[in-house]
Amino acid sequence: MTYLFLRQEETDMIDIHNRLSQPFAACINNEWIYSPICFDVTNPATGETITTVPNLGIAETEQAIEAAATAFESWSITTPKERSKILHKWFLLITEHTEAIAHTMTLEQGKPIAEARGEVSYGASFVEWFAEEAKRSYGETIPSPAAGKRLFTIKQPIGVVAAITPWNFPVAMVTRKLAPAIAAGCTVVLKPAAETPLCALLLMELAIAAGLPKGVLNIITSTAAAAVGKVLTTHPSVKKVSFTGSTEVGKLLMEQSASTLKKLSLELGGNAPLIVFDDADIAVAVSATMASKFRNAGQTCVCANRIYVQTGIYYPYIEVLKAAVEKLVTGNGLLTDTSIGPLINREAKDKVIAFIKDAENKGAKIIAGIPDTEADSLYIHPTIITNCTPEMDLSKEEIFGPLLAVYIFDKEEDVIALANDTPYGLAAYFFTENVRRCYRVMEQLDYGMIGINEGIISHAEAPFGGMKQSGFGKEGSRYGLEEYLATKYVCLNTTEYKN
């Protein structure tokens, strides 16, 4: 085995800068796949090319699926304890190499280095959690309605899994899918985002170093997302597709997967409301708003998208919020004082600028931040825009940038109707000191995840997933393991027949 960034038979990190100066490779059947056809991975903070990776296509994707199908025959019958040991070793290696992975993440994705370190830790937590959950894929005994029969269920791995991950969390979105699939006894073909493939490849090498057998995990790097996605969703050997991305693409993958009736997990777009009631603690509400909205420059699917503030607390909340936003520093994520990095590409920046212009044309007002709409860079200064209304584009679509849209409301029933007025249902947040309101509002919000007096809600131990057009299926928690298991029912006749 030729290691990419580890010394042979060691787990010591070599100089990551030297490693990034060399071409990367994809990985099929634990073999590094190079290609004369490559694409550049660029740093969104500088526009510079970091390195190149192979631009693979249909043939290599089919090869990866075949490797995974072959490996499934043996991996699916390994004991949960064996799988647990490998996953735990993988977790330890990821943790040991946090700094190099985080540095790579900041280079290819742009987020501040402190956030990148946090994501590596968060991503590793899924590997640790599912290393433990691997040993808990319980079946059950069912009381029989008939004498002489024993009814029970067993859980078995579903088969080859296709995992397609986005660019905004290039470690956590990968481990959140791979760890439960591997723990369940499945094998995987991973297609990471073309913008951020490097972290996935580093994780691949660490998985091999941890002892993951050939073919259990395979990585296809490609800019041909549509072609590769169609192979993954239509190939008969793939039994499960797990996708995180836009609702539009999710619907297409679901349509393609119907040809072979694959099991699906879809974590799609969001349009998260954040509600601040009159009885909220302003300091808590502002702190949580900042954490939810500006993490990763607002490029998260659970970001607070629409901030609804009740009349009685509106101006005090805005005053504290504005002061907090004005302290944020925009810049290269490798600089220690940076709190907001660049957006991922020009298209993302143009979309946010379009939201601002549309809102201003419809009566909104910028009270913090002066967006640099003409600059060639991908930075947008954190911006607060008030006087927002449901007719504005930013009310209907996911912003995915450091733009905070504020609305004012009077009555509880009105804001619940406004919050639910969207086809999406991923995450919602609200702030109140009234415990009765906590239960009342939580039950009425049509969202898969609710944060009450909290802006950061994701944990490996808890189920992550949405409702409505934000998709279905859960990641994390014991429910995350179930997504990769098939329940088999057994009816055993114990009657002894006498001649």
Image: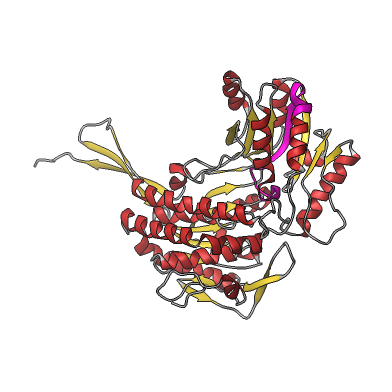
The residue most toward the left is: 499
Query: Observer-nearest residue: 148 or 45?
Result: 45
> 372 above or below 43?
above
Left/right placement of residue 380 relative to residue 24 reads right
Task: Give residue 496's position: percent from left, percent from top.
Answer: 13, 40
Query: Observer-nearest residue: 100 or 353?
Result: 100
Task: Give residue 15's position: percent from left, percent from top.
Answer: 55, 72
Which residue is at a point 78% across and 32% down the rendered structure image? 319
Q: Is residue 383 visible?
A: yes
Q: Which span of residues is magenta-colored?
A: 296-316
> 114 above or below 462?
below
**Quadrant showing the C terminus:** top left
Which residue is at a point 74% across and 28% down the rendered structure image? 309
Which residue is at a point 20% across and 35% down the rendered structure image? 148
Specify whether residue 307 is painted magenta: yes
Left/right placement of residue 359 relative to residue 419 reads right
Instruction: Count the marks.
Output: 0
Query: Observer-nearest residue: 178 or 494?
Result: 178
Specify whether residue 379 is painted magenta: no
Q: Is residue 420 visible?
A: no
Which residue is at a point 59% across and 24% down the rendered structure image? 438
> 309 above or below 296?
above
Task: Give residue 102's position: percent from left, percent from top.
Answer: 58, 60
Residue 21, image quadrant: bottom right
Residue 17, image quadrant: bottom right
**Quadrant showing the N terminus:** bottom left
